[in-house]
Image: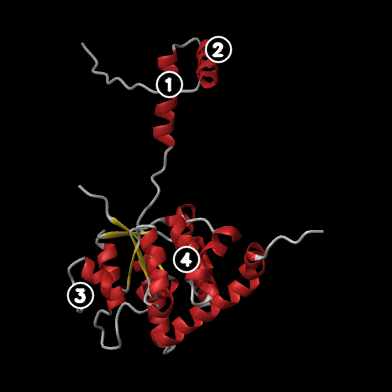
Amino acid sequence: MTVEVKRITIRVAPELHLRLNQLAANQDVSLNTLAINALEAYAANRKETPTQLPLQELSALLAPVADADSVTEEELLRHARETRQRLWKERYEKITLAQTQPATSA
Amino acid sequence: MTAPLRVFPDTGVLLAMIVFPKDRRGNLTLAGEALTLYNAGAYRLVIGQAIADELDEVLDERFPAHRAAAVSLLRPFAGQFIRRPTPREIADVLDSCTDPADAPVFASALIARPDIVLANDFAAFHTPVAKLLWARYGITVESLYGLLCVFGRRLRKV
């Protein structure tokens, strides 16, 4: 029976190459086997990161609340604008404007 | 197969998509159509941490009873958010902003390098000086209507 294998070639820094060789020797396996074990463990533990933001779920949560409270879009957008201006004052303004001041000599 | 367009939304359009996808009569709004396209995978949203910060504040103040649930829905995506800009990066875009409060968002968008900045705030994001900035970085700025034009759902107004 022949097991089909695929070949991959990777380039690593000499320091990593040395460390991997030492690890393989310690485990009494080849560098190839060490790499396969590491890749299999990575693939098994890798959790797929979701990419689609749950906007539909957020909408199902918040749109009925806004409707029940008669919140208008204009009102909410004005609130968002005011929030932006408040965060600018609280978090960003001072440290940003410090970047625009010419350095003063002692 | 080409990769889906990367779209960086301003807080206002994100809120509109989430809270006002339909009008009082139950018809889809422009934001609702944009949400439908997003759910269909037509484009990818790239969220700035600066946008997430604003969204969190608005949720806390306007939807306090539902903030925790909303935040828990977004938490798995926090690692994908575009980092907050540095003071230097914010200072560098100040001249392109009519309101300095927009500078952190402008700077976040430049870090994200999306295909499209999506904003309905014409006085802030669609000014000639702002458009020059976007163009310099190969970014297009679109309104919700403009986004629907990109996907052939509306015709450009001449």
What amino acid is found at the position of numbered circle 4 in the picture? Answer: Phe
**Residue at horizontal 41 percent and vertical 74 percent from the top:** B15
Mark 4 residue crowding within 10 angstroms, few (<14) / some (14–19) / many (20+):
many
- The Cα atoms of the two marked residues, 4 and 3, are separated by 25 Å
Q: CA distance from mark 2 to mark 1?
A: 14 Å
Query: Of marks 2 and 1, which one's residue comes earlier in the chain?
Result: 2
How much space separates mark 3 and mark 1, taking CA atoms?
54 Å
Report x, y in % for residue B113. 40, 56
Is residue B152 toward the left or the right of residue B52 in the image? left
Residue at mark 2: A26
The residue under the point 66% across, 64% down is A95
Residue in front for this viewpoint, B44 or B143: B143
Q: Which residue is mark 4?
A: B106
- Label 4 marks a residue whose chain is B
Structural crowding at the residue carrying mark 2, measured as other residues with C-alpha within 10 Å and reported as few (<14), some (14–19) or many (≥20):
few
For label 3, the residue is: B156
| Disc 1: which residue | A35
